[in-house]
Structure formats: C-alpha cells, structure tokens
Image: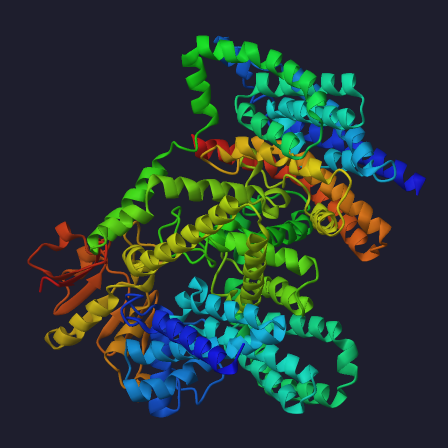
Amino acid sequence: MKKLKVLTIILSLIFFVAIRILIFRFIPIEGLDLSSPFIADLLGKGVTTPYLLIVLSDVVNLFLIWIIARKFLGNNYGFLAPVFYAISPWPAYLTIDGSIFIFVLTGTLLFYLGIMLMEEKRKFLGVSLASLGVGVMIYSNLSMFFVLPFLILGIYFGKLFTKKDCKFPITILIILMLPIVLLSLIHRNNLRGDIAKNISLFDGVGLINSVNTFRGEARNVGYPHLGILVENKITYLGRRVIFNALTALSPYTYFTQQFKLLGFSFTPPIFLGLLIPCLYGLVSLINKKHGNYHLLWLTLPFLIPAILREYFPDLTSLILILPTIIFISAWGMGELIRNRKLAFIVITVFLIFLQGVTSIYDITTREPIRYRETIQANK
Amino acid sequence: MKKTKLLILIFLITLLGGFLRFYKFTQNPVSLNIDEVSFGYDAYSVLKTARDQYGNFLPLTFKSTGDYKNPVVIYSMIPSIAIFGLNEFGVRFPTALISTLAIPLFFFLFRKISRNESVALIATLFLAISPWDIYFSRYASDTLIASVFIGLGVFAFLKMLEGGKRWAFLSALSFTLSAYTYHSEKLFLPLFYLIIFWIYRKKLLLLKQSVVIFVLTTAVLVSPLLYLTFFGPGMARADMVFITNDIEFTRNVLLNDSGVKFSAIANIPLLFFFWARKYLAYFSPSFLFYSGLQMTTPGSYGLGVLYLFEVITLPFGIYSLIKGRIPQKGIISSWILLGLIPASLTNNEQHAGRTIFILPAVIILSAWGFLEFIKLIGRISIRYVKYSVIATFLILVIWDLVHALLTFGVYFPQERDEDSMNGTKEAVEYILQNQDKYKEVVFDPNRGIVAPYIVNVPHIYILFYSKYDPHTYQTEVKRVGNNSYGFGKYTIRKINWPQDQNLHDTLFVGSPWSLNEKDVGSENILKKIYLENGSLALIVAKSNN
C-alpha cells in the first residue's frame, strides 16, 4: 500500500510538471491573461501580476492542498487531494495563461487553513494565515468583497468560534479592509471601472432583447399586462442567477469539455474518471457526515464571482471551487478503498489514465490548431 | 384515502391533463411537421390499399422520407383517419388520447413504485401538467407513445414479481411494443432488462414460469424487429444519426482529421469522452429547467423539460433516493441513467423527444421531493420563516405555470412555427386550387428566414393535403433526378429563377431566397405566405410565359 502511495504521488507530480511544460511548449497562451490586481486598478497603476508569481502560486496551492487534506481526510488518504490537483488540467491551463485567479486560489486556501488551525486552538498561526489569505483575496480581485460577507456569515451561523475568539480576527480583518475601502472612496472612477469588469450580470443586450421580445409577443395577442408581470428585468435576472448557480453545481461543467477551457480547449477542467469518487463522496457525505463537513458548505460563496459574470460559466473564476471538488473526490476515493469497491476503483483509475494520455496527445497535436482557429474566429 | 375520493381526484386530474392536451391542438403547434404529415399519409395509404406509399404490404418499417419510421404510431392513426379524415385532427388525435388516458393508468404505476398514495397522486398531477408530456402530446409523437408503453411495461413487470403469469405476458408485450414505436427503446430495453433482472434476480428465481413466459414472448415478438434492424433497412436510421456524424465532433474535436499521427487510435477515446459530455449534458440546468423543449428562440429562457419550481422538489427527491427512502430505487435509477444512453449516442444536442420515456421516473423523484419539502416546511417552528418559505414557493409555482402558459400559447407559435414548416400547407392549398391553369408546379424544398438552411419535404405535404390517391402514387412513374424529384405535374427541386422564369405555364413555390421579389416582379407574384411573426416565408409565383 505504501509503495502504491509513493508511486501514485510520483506519477502525479510527473504529470503535474509534464502537462504544464507541454502547454507552455505547444500552445502559445503563456501570460495572455496577465491582469492587474484590484489594488493596482484602484490606484490607476497599470501593473500586471508577475507571471512568476502565478507559477509559484500554482506550486504553493499544491502544497497547501496537501496540508489541508491531511487535516480534512487524515494521513491515510490525505495524499489523494494533492494528487488530484496535480493531475487536473484546469490549474495547468490557467497557470500557463497567467490567470490571477491562481493567486486568489492561494488566498482562499490560506484562509481555509487558517480557519482549520483556529478550530484546533492554534490561534496565532490560524489568524495569521487566515488574514494573509483574506488580504491576498481582497487585494487581488474585487469580487472577493462579495464573497467575504458570506464567509463571515457562514462562520457565524456555523458557530465555529465563540464571540471571544472572533474579536481578534475581526479586528485584523477591519485593519486589512480599511486601506481598500478608503482607496475605493478616493478613486471612485477606477472602482466603477473595476465593478464593470467583474460584475457583468446586469449588462448585456440579451437581457433587454429577451424581455422586449416576449412582451411584444404577449402584447400582439392581447395580454400586455400579463407579459409585463411575467417578463421583466427582475424575473429575468432572477432566472439568470439561478441558472448560473445551477450550472456551477452541475458535474458536466467540471468533468466534461462542455465549456471550453480558455475558450478553445477540448481538455476538461477535471478528468472524467474523478466523477465516480466525487459522486460517491457526495453520497457518503450525505449519509454519514464527516467531521469537517461544514467547511465544504463554506466554499459555496466562492461561486459568487463566477455567478456575477454575464457569460457563464466563467471557468477562470470558478477555479476557486476546485479544492472543494478535489476534497470531495479524495474523500470519495478513500471511501471506495475503505469499502473495497474494486470495480469502481479500477474504472476510475482506467478513465483517469486514458484521459490523461489522450489529453497529453491532444495538447501536442490538435490543441494548438484549435487555439489558432479560435483566435482566427475571434478576429 | 377513501376510494371514491381518490377516483374523483384522479378523474379531475385526468380532465385537467386532457384539457391541456386537446385544447386547440390542431392549431398549436401551428402546422403539421414533416413527420406528422408523413405518418398521416402512410396511415392513409395503408387504410386505402393496405400498403405504404412505396407499395409495401403492411410493412413493419416505413421508409417514409428515408428515415425508416416505426410502425406503431402509423397503425394507431388508421382508425382516427378513417373516422376524422386525413387532416390535423385525425393525425394528432391518437397521441393526445393515449397521453390523456396514460394519466390515470400511470397513477397505478406511481403507486406501485412509491408504495405511497400521496406521492402517486402528486406524481399524477405532475404528469398531467408536465410541459415535457404536454409538448409531445400535442404532436403526433412516436416518442410519447413509446414512453407510455415503457411505463405500462414497468408496471406489469412489478405486478409479475408479485406472482401473476399474465403480467409477464403483458409486460413483455408492452416493452416490445415500445421498441416497435420508437428507435431509442431498441437500445434501452436490452440494457434495462439486464439491470432489472439482476436487481430482482432472487425473486425471479422463484417465478421461473413467469420468466419463461416473459422471455419467450419477447423473443417471438421481437424477432421480426431484430431481423429488420440487422438485415433490413433498420440500420439506415442508426447510420444517419450516430454520434460519429456529429458536426461538432468531426469539425472541432477531430478537426476534420487534420492528418495528425496515430489519429485512428486516438480518435476512439476522444469519441468516448465526447459521448460522455453529451450524456452528462442531459443533467444540465439548460435542458432540465430553461430551454430543453426548444420552444423559443435559442439563447432565450423558454421552457425546460421540467418546471423551474422543480429545482426545489427534484433535489429533495434525489436526496430521498440516496437515503434509501424510495422503494424500487433500483428501477428508478436504472430507468433514468440507462434511458439517456440512446439519445446521447446521436448526433444532436439534447433531444427532449428521444428521452421522454424517462419522464415517469423523474416525476416520481419530483413528487417524492415535493412531499419531503412540504414535511420540511411543516417542521419549521418560526412562523414568519415558515410563511415566507410557503409564499416564495407559491409565487414561484404560479409564476412558472403562467410563464409556461405564455410559452405554449404565445411565444411558441410565434417563434418556432418555421420548424413545423408553417406556410407549406397554405402554399399547397393554393397550388391545389389553381394547378389546373398550369402544366407544372415546381416547389423549392429549401427555406428559412435567416438563411435557406431548412430543408422541407414538400411532396409529402402535397400528397397529404390533396389526399392524393395512394394507389396512383404507388404505381405511377416518379421522376428522380439529380437533386430533384417529381410525380404527376409536381416537381421538387431548387429554383433557378433567371432560367426558370422562361418556362411555360409553370407555377413556382419557394422562399424569398430562391424567388427574390425584385427579380420575380410583382406581376408574377401570386401569393405571399407569412409566418406568425410576420416574416415572409414563401412566395407563389408564375413563370413569365
């Protein structure tokens, strides 16, 4: 078992490095998505996130997932979570692309690690890491401001800590947020620009067109008032938000290439084989609650940045939910092994291997062509 | 619940379901589509001559428009056409009737599966108002009739397990009839049999006689179908629609086989993962709750196969299934999961018609979930929270139902009538009234408002609305040429107006793409035919001479 564990880790690390090198080598997306952090936008400085920082964050994420997984899943199966992260194409593509959300992901993982340490009564370290995580999140991307209140509410309603425990972290949080809030008030134009960039849900011609078309048709047949009552901006937006949320919770968003990574790729965000342990893990969590089950609920607010985009799903911002899927999959895989569901394990491993080999082959042959054709089409 | 009260409730639900299926069903959908016209004319031909339009005697597969249709829906239409005539009513009546009668029958199925009368009643109501079921009930729909047979088959199978040899025969008969009704069932049934026989293997070992009756009945009834599928024209349909012909797969995934090395080996796993994507896409919110029925223009929020309020009830049902609270969970799970396989192997995106036979299983989950949801609300102790939840849910339900009514009654006729070839009937009726003045009638099959990408089959509309004598059509010589087809004075081909305008005594029917108004001239235009939304669909024109 130990040899198998070591072999799995080594193979996954080889894949982790190999896929990134191959994407870098064959598909010219390197650094295409380098955007400036929120704080830079606010100050009006045209500073882009250093590419090396994104690449380093990717490696740090692997390490953080390993640490969190050991606490969440125990020593026996904790190694599965970093393995699943290592073999997922999603962070590989976004890292080579230079997406700032890889860095924001580091912030979220630091935050969670901090919360877990605080629960273990390692207050100073926990608060430090959680604060660092919050700092990384809110200084990098505006939409984290919408996530943070929900995280705090979740911690409050989940009764994770006593009021006394919360005083110090809240003080740190206020100190962290103060500069950003002040700068937002001073540089309101820059703030508006960033809001427009991150929250496009209310924009878009599609909204007005749809509402107008349906209303017009209802009016044509003599039901103008009914048309206004049923078809209006509020109901349309409500449906939009529900639709975005549901799509974010659908397996096909993550385990298939339904929504192409970076707009062109046939590689799925997460390999299809992991769907089996993921579903098994979900069922298992429903039937017998895991000790740190509540932390999974706390990850739901990370869907907010993606939900606020008009064109959904935005696989770039949705990467913040990747650790949740990985932890559930790792938990599910552990349960499959514990319950000796050999057939499911074999199918999972076979599918992962098959898709891994196919993806590597595809990246070196057809993906560059798909990328070029997408660029041509967008011109 | 008292039996009388139960029967009254079922009757009222059936009345409601019947109303939603029959009300103006000859006018909405606005036009008979190609399949309906084809079904109708073949049924008429069999009624008159005991042969299909190609002269085949009582066939078990109908060549139709080259897609080899299954026989049950056509034969079921014969009495209706005999009584009501070859028209919209005669064609659509059998499906609407079968769908309405299925409502009370399915109550017993739901009760058998759920072992809960309340769930069964709720499920029956959900079926009566189901947009998925209503949509396909208002067409002549082979998929819907097949789904009724599947439901009856499952019910009879569960009765068979209680010990009843006649139920074995009925179950095998129902299932086999479904395979004679629609194509998806031919792939679904073998897989379904394997699973349910495995799930109930212990019980079945004690019912050997019933199993023998079931197997023998299936073997005898299905053998002609097997022969036709593997040695006859049955495979033609499969070839047409198989996933390897999917344009997205060949163009975007394989990149039209761009000469990459080892592509023949690599394409197989790529095809598998492409199929997996199509399969999982059936669980997408877009298909389930937003636009699965494709009743409005693409990109807008029309109607999914389920109501939006079922976003709440369905997860509760799934949760109950996982927790093992629903009896017969094996049948429900396999019914849904296997039922999506045949449709996912085709070259279209999600197709509501090809998967409708999983509807009863989905409805049970939704109904069970609804009951669980009600129980949960009952457990809320804080009054204002309880009433807020009830009010929000009620508002959502009412809004959803009104939106569905508007979609069916208002948006659908105006936005999707072109898909039903609206305008073709009007054009054909004009031709029939005026054809004596002309030597030839030329009908261009290509049409479309955005571009001429819709391919009509006008000759079948001519046969249908003229009640063309089937014997004459079977025996007369057809003019089959390069991209053209003709019989009698009718020719179906692309119109080339610069040349065609010089023909003598010829009547033309085509879209504005082939009969440009400016080129044709107002003096030659006899009639313009519009869609419900006011777009010009077809032009009837005469030649210059």
- Which quadrant of the rendered structure holds the N terminus of chain A? top right
Residue B402 in percent (x, y) is at: 35, 56
Residue A339 in percent (x, y) is at: 84, 53
Residue A295 vertical placement versus B318 (above, below): above
Whether residue A255 appears in this view of the structure is yes
Q: Residue at x 85, y 33 (%)?
A: A10
Q: Residue at x 63, y 67 (%)?
A: B332
Residue A145 vertical placement versus A227 (above, below): above
Residue B76 is left or right of residue A161, and the answer is left
Q: How many marks?
A: 0
Q: Residue at x 93, y 39 (%)?
A: A2
Residue B423 in percent (x, y) is at: 23, 64
**Based on the displayed image, in which of its 4 quarters is residue B499 positioned?**
bottom left
Foreground residue among A356 and B335: B335
Foreground residue among B472 and A212: A212
Figure coloring:
rainbow
Foreground residue among A104 and B274: A104
Residue B55 in percent (x, y) is at: 39, 86
Whether residue B68 appears in this view of the structure is no
**Based on the displayed image, in which of its 4 quarters is residue A316 positioned?**
top right
